[in-house]
Image (cartoon, rainbow, N blue to C red):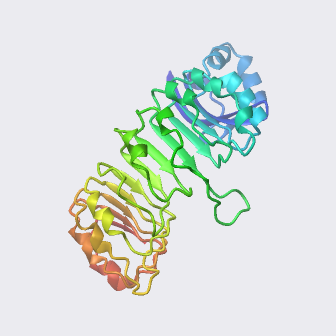
């Protein structure tokens, strides 16, 4: 009897790697979800006939190298790069870009998700990305590192060679960058884009953003009140406005009435905002809205009682 085990880790050569094991006999599975197989575990498996076959069938599916030096990242990719790899996370810091062996990505033709986290060492997307014709998600984000408060901002230029990224993208994330005006050319490169993650501020220009989006995350931005332009995104099914300073303005009103034209909206995240002086009843007029997250948004019980939505998280 066989099954698929996902979410197990494999520790080799000092590099912690996320993996997926296919066709491993149940008798030789020695870990649970979230655990790691050590070299000792693998040695124990190898001493069984079924274990030998299982080890031969190990196929790397996910690889997280964000905490590794560029030398470790190169070594890991030399070992595990191949068409079976589906998700890859990298951190390439300043002065490391020329040291990274970009040609190793040519082997990763099955890659579906690529994360560049805190990659201030990338000044242009390399042309080698164009071979990743199965790529569906690209994340180019700055995030807080352990022990840091807040996040720093990536210097993302308008002419970042987006043409090097395959047109197959369905999700794009560019969080915490200095890109204020979203270039039209960026979205023209991705006709199939359905989801977009971005951290805006009150000076963000919205005109280039494609109106066919089904998912939009503006989490962690600086909005204070909703821009009128949001009413144009009438195909949205999921909208994340969490931790965006909504309502933290002179009137205390986040102007949620902007959302009223979004008749397809199913999920709305408004957590960690300032909504005690905002009229929430407008949300009842969104016919498909079934989930609203208001956790830590300083709303009153009276406001909550007015909501008729199926699931309200508070």
Q: Indicate whether 200 appears above or below 44.
A: below
Estimate the x, y position of residue 154 in percent, counting from the top left.
61, 54
Estimate the x, y position of residue 116 in percent, counting from the top left.
60, 43
Quadrant of the image occupied by residue 255: bottom left
Of the pair 47 and 288, the residue shown nearer to us: 288
Q: Indicate whether 76 appears above or below 172.
A: above
Residue 137 located left or right of residue 106: left
Q: Indicate whether 97 appears above or below 196.
A: above
Estimate the x, y position of residue 244 in percent, counting from the top left.
48, 69
Tally of numbered discs: 0
**Point 61% across, 36% down: residue:** 8
Of the pair 298 and 313, the residue shown nearer to us: 298
In the displayed image of the protein, which residue is found farthest to the front? Answer: 159
**Point 62% across, 58% down: residue:** 153
**Point 42% across, 65% down: residue:** 241
Estimate the x, y position of residue 173 in percent, counting from the top left.
49, 49
Res 308 visible: no
Quadrant of the image occupied by residue 160: top right
Of the pair 95 and 59, the residue shown nearer to us: 95
Res 171 visible: yes
Residue 305 located left or right of residue 56: left
Of the pair 49 and 148, the residue shown nearer to us: 148
Quadrant of the image occupied by residue 309: bottom left
**Point 64% across, 24% down: residue:** 103
Q: Indicate whether 150 appears above or below 97.
A: below
Which quadrant of the figure contains the C terminus? Answer: bottom left
């Amino acid at each position: 009897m066989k099954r698929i085990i996902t979410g197990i880790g494999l520790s080799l050569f000092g590099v912690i790697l996320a993996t997926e094991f296919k066709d491993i006999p149940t008798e030789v599975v020695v870990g649970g979800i979230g655990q790691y197989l050590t070299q000792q575990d693998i040695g124990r498996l190898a001493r069984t006939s079924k274990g030998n076959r299982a080890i031969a069938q190990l196929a790397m599916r996910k690889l997280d190298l964000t905490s590794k030096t560029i030398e470790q990242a190169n070594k890991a990719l030399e070992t595990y790069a191949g068409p079976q790899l589906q998700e890859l996370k990298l951190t390439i810091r300043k002065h490391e870009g020329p040291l990274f062996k970009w040609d190793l990505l040519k082997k990763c033709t099955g890659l579906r998700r690529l994360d560049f986290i805190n990659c201030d060492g990338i000044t242009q997307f390399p042309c080698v990305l164009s071979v990743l014709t199965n790529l569906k998600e690209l994340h180019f984000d700055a995030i807080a590192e352990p022990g840091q408060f807040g996040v720093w901002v990536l210097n993302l230029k308008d002419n970042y060679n987006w043409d090097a990224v395959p047109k197959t993208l369905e999700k794009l994330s560019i969080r915490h960058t200095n890109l204020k005006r979203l270039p039209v050319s960026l979205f023209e490169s991705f006709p199939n884009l359905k989801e977009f993650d971005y951290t805006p501020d009150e000076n963000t220009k919205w005109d280039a953003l494609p109106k066919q989006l089904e998912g939009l995350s503006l989490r962690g931005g600086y909005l204070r009140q909703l821009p009128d332009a949001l009413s144009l995104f009438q195909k949205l099914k999921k909208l994340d406005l969490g931790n965006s300073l909504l309502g933290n303005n002179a009137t205390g009103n986040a102007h949620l009435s902007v959302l009223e034209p979004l008749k397809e909206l199913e999920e709305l995240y408004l957590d960690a905002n300032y909504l005690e002086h905002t009229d929430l009843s407008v949300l009842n007029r969104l016919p498909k809205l079934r989930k609203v997250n208001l956790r830590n948004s300083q709303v009153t019980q009276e406001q909550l009682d007015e909501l008729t939505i199926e699931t309200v998280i508070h």
